[in-house]
Image (cartoon, rainbow, N blue to C red):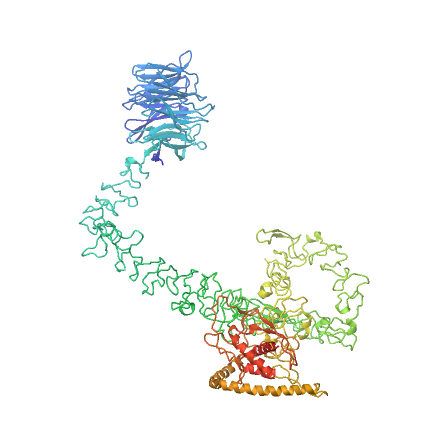
Amino acid sequence: MAFHTTSSFTALEQDVVTTGTMGQWLGSTTTHDNKQVLAYTSGVGQQIFTATQGTNGWQTDMVRTGAELASSIEVNVDSQDTPHLVYRHNDTGQLEVAVGGASWGLTPLGNPGEAMSLQHPSAMLDNDSLAVGLVASNGTGTNLAVWIHDDSGLTKHDVANHTDLNTQLGLAVLTNGSLVLSALTSDGTLSVYEHWPGASGWVQHTVPQPGTSNDGYRLDSIGGDHPMLAIRGNAVSSILSLNETGVWSFVAERPAAATNGAWDLIRHGQHLILMTSAPTSSRLVFNSLDLNRSDGEHGGWMSVEFGDVVVGHGVHPSLDDNGTVHMAYWETVDDDVVMLRMYADHDRDLVFDLIDAMPTVGDQWKNTDGDGYGDNPLGPLPDACPVDAGPSSFIFHGCDDYDTDGYRDSIDGCDDEGGTSWIDRYGCEDLDQDGWSDNDASYFDGDVFKGNWKQALDTDGDGFGDNHGVDCCAVPVFDPNAGPGDLFPYLETQYMDSDGDGFGDNDTDTVYGDFCPFDYGESYRDRNGCLDSDGDGASDPSGEGTFLEWNATVHGADVWPFDGTQWADSDGDGFGDNQSENATNPDRFPLRKAVANDTDQDGYADNWTEYYNGSNAQGIQLDSCPTEWGNSTRRNLTVYAYGCPDSDGDGYTDSYVYDIDQNTGLRINELGDAFPEEPTQSKDNDGDGFGDNPIGVNGDICPTVPGVAEGTEGPGCRIIDVNDDDGDGVINELDTLCPNSPTGQPVNEDGCAQSELDDDDDGVKNNADLCPSTSLGESVDDDGCSVEQRNTDSDGDGLNDPDDACPNTEAGQVVDESGCSEAQRDSDGDGVSDLDDACDDTPFGFPVLADGCTDESALDTDLDGDGYSGVYAYDIDPVSGLHVNQTGDAFPSDSTQWFDQDGDGFGDNPSPANNADDCPTEFGSSYIDFLGCYDDGDGYRDENEPESLRGDATQWRDSDFDGYGDNWGDPSWNATRDDNWPGQFVPGATNADYCPLTTLGLPVDEEGCHVSQRDTDLDGVTDDADNCPTEPKGEDGFDDGCPRPTISSDDGGGLLGDLSTGLIAAIAGGVVALLVLLAVLIRVVRGDEDDEDDDYDDFYDDDEEEENFLDRLDRTRQAAPLRSRPAPQRAASSTPSSTPRPVGRAPAPKSNPPQGRAPSGPAKRTTGGPPGRAKSTASTKTAGKKKAAKKKVVAAEEATGTKVRKAKINVDMSIFEDWQDDDRNAAVDWVAGAFDDGDEERTVLMQLQETGWTAEQSRAICSLAKNKRA
């Protein structure tokens, strides 16, 4: 490490001469009384002037006229401060000295032509002799010379032969009186000569050579105690110093500097200062070099460039007794003389030392009271009492301090007794020197432990000092047995923490105490300081099965000890209470067991949990748009949809779809909000932009007739011609056949639209008649075609006429799926058939040539008169991809459109312009509900479709919000499809809904149907109520869907008719034996169970009480059975819906704690009936509730022997809860016994349901019993 200092100065500048003609060949020096003397010429006038600094300014004096100079004037003063000027007349080659006084005395030095060099450095010697160095001519040659001028005359000393007249010269006087002459030639040769006092000759020194470059050499030298040379060369430059042994040594490389300009060396204390000009700007540069580095090295230059001082010559620095550097320069722009001073400023506060009362304290320069503290309140150590001297030195400086302890009397807590305390009070006794004053009889807020410097306070008053740590708190002599300190200094109930977990060892403190004081733990929610493996604040369960058990159910331990995002489950649904971001299975409804998920956090649940039983929703509705925040409640008056976007807050979803009635042209099946930004309107039956609510904003007075704002009868009505009531263009007088033609449909001359005519009188209107020429009286189908017409192919192209769009195709032509040949098709609608069209994709409306290609020349004409013409051109915005800088006309035949920024074929101009793009910045293809918006290929805007149907070109509506679309693609569904149901047949339709009007919220199967909408055996009893869902009950069957058992009555003698006599006898004997055995068993069973009859009676009484409730749960309102496949009826208008997608039950996370099992029923068959389901208790799951788990299917092998009826093949075990296993097994055993006794299956099913099993569970138990008997 090296200590490096720099010289600090404050620079001041002053204009000395501002006449605009002065300053050339400037020279400067300083008198012994620190005044500056300048000499300069007037330029053109060839006059020499001096400017001498006086008490009241500068005094200017003219020395002489007619001076033609070519080099700077040398200025010196003698011991009487008389100025001596040395200059060279360039025209005569002669030196001259001018000596000041009352007048100027001029004395030539040498003869004309004798002074050959431009440079002539000079120095005033101690005896007031003037020494001048030069290259002089002796008549036969030139020499380096030193001339000495004094009162007795001129003495010339030749130093060495020298021929280079452009040599840089330096002359310095050493402290011992020696003269040192240095010379640096234009080719880089350096020579140094010294003349000792009293010596007869000159001694040449050995010096390092700067190099061999051809230009750019500069030389300056200083003498005194430390002679130095500053050498500049293009290649090698350096600062050299003459040491005590007479050897010139290297000091440092020179700083960067211009070839011309300043090159002036001066020493200031232990710093070398070199003034240079910057290489490119020629601005003056102050360079400082530390000569007293602690490591012996001089380090680098510290350089500062002056911002606006430009110099092209030397600045002639000189140092006065105060350490001020005096300089001057010729300001060449204005031809002025400028003085520049560098005043020493050790504290760098810009108030230099000469006027700074506190020169070593920065930002303090005035000390009025002389107490050593500065008056500047913003500076360091400011004097708080600037006009009153005082010795205080802490906090408030320079004020009264009676006890001289450094603290001002006004803040000194003990102002008459010196002290060192500084924390609680200032300047009082502090025995242990810890900063806290000692408590005494009158002071109690200080050091409680005044002999222990490691302790001071006991904030909580528990006897243990506040400080603590590994080194606390014993101290030698005074308190060697001090305790460890207080880890809880603000808590009087705690002071130790053995396991270091932040909770105190005192477990009697139930708030802050450590429940596990010797085991590190971070839990704090249920108990403090115990193991918390996942770091969520809830402790891990512990001590299970012991008297120290700490569990989740009773004590609040972590339900999920290895999941740091969850710890509690208040409603026991398996979803954690913590709803923070990234939490595992967060419960958005922590106190409602039936729901948990709410993806969009709009307050509407995504789905039901497995604990939903139909009656525990607690006001929660399912979210019809679970991934979009919304506030809607319905799609129309009968279809509810909660949680979808509803911008205007009227309750209706923003998404809006509808169908068109083919007969009236009106919108039907409207779902959503036709006016999503207007809360007073939601429907628009006629699609005219006026809402159906007549008292709302822009209400439609004629909601079933498209109209305009200025309609005859009001807004939304059409303008009626009094002579044309239906507005078809045919006056009433002539419009007698069809006086009420549908609005907008073209009519014939009689005023009739095709939808009103039936030319072939077959009962099918012309607009829907595929066979318009059917013979009178023939039977036709819905398309108006007879059987013969259906099977006729007039043009023989393979398509029958009703399906043939081009029924007159020439023989042999290839046709498409519509029956049209290439000559009959015009794909781009430009009037040129595809056969002749060389450009079959011409934009609609563009003018074309005979070959069907765009007529570019025609585009230059404004064909549609909209003011735009020319080929449509544009640039592509690289960010948005939109068309910008559009020119021409993108729609040359449409006067309402001309530009298309998204390039989708729909114009940018809004409606009522033709084909107005509803989404002008989206490249879209929708064309039904909105034009030009993103579309998956079905024509409807994706944004208005249910989320589950976006991306499916075959679906666009989901009326019951179960996730399945209304359209279907299976032709076999056509026969069972109700005409009033939504949707249409779309070949290849995917994700189709067989039951499009399922009540919202019900779980559905893969075809969108609830079990209550299925009737597999087509017996009129829906599957959910059918005990025999695969067997029709027949005409005389039971209400539960099972057929009556039948007894054969054929000629063979009935059931036993075909059996032999021996076999009959064997059967009869077996029956008798069985009856005897049965009687014995009954007696034994009754004897064993007499004592338990009361208990069983009570048990079954309870079951009977429960029966009515369970029956009510099972007997929910069902839709009517369907014809072949199950299909839904229309939802009742009063039934709210709550979800737009398949509503299953959310399975609880696997880590959910197991629930207790309900008490089981009887394990064996009794005369009292089959075992029932266990009653629900507080610790059991709701009875009869399905689990949301994978189906477990058990094959039921058909038993051998004669069966009354056929059993189901498989058993779905997921309809049972885990805790019902024992009850189910007991019921299976009982049913197997009943079958063995010959009981009818229908009777068994009824008994099972009477004991609480559902119909579905009862059928499954029977099937399992059959498996067991097989």
Residue 1226 visible somewhere in the drawing: yes
x and y, in percent, of residue 558 in the image: 43, 65
* Residue 805 place in picture, x, y as percent: 75, 66
Determine the image quadrant of residue 684: bottom right
Towards the viewer: 449 or 68: 449
Residue 1080 screen position, x and y as percent: 55, 87
Q: Is residue 577 above or below residue 1183?
A: above
Q: How many labels does the image show?
A: 0
Say left or right for 985 vs 529. Answer: right
> With respect to residue 203, does 646 lie above or below?
below
Above or below: residue 52 compared with residue 199: below
x%, y% of residue 158?
Answer: 37, 14
Which image quarter is the N terminus in? top left
Identify the residue at the far top of this view: 140
Left or right, residue 1015 beside residue 345: right
**Does residue 684 appear anywhere in the picture?**
no
Looking at the picture, does residue 577 appear above or below residue 1134? above
Q: Quadrant of residue 1078?
A: bottom right
| Residue name at image x 60 percent, y 87 percent | 1073
Asked whether 1065 or 1107 is in front, the reply is: 1065
Question: In the figure, is residue 277 to the left or right of 453?
Answer: right
Residue sitting at the far right: 811
Quadrant (top left, top right, bottom left, bottom right) of the C terminus: bottom right
Residue 766 placement, left or right of 97: right
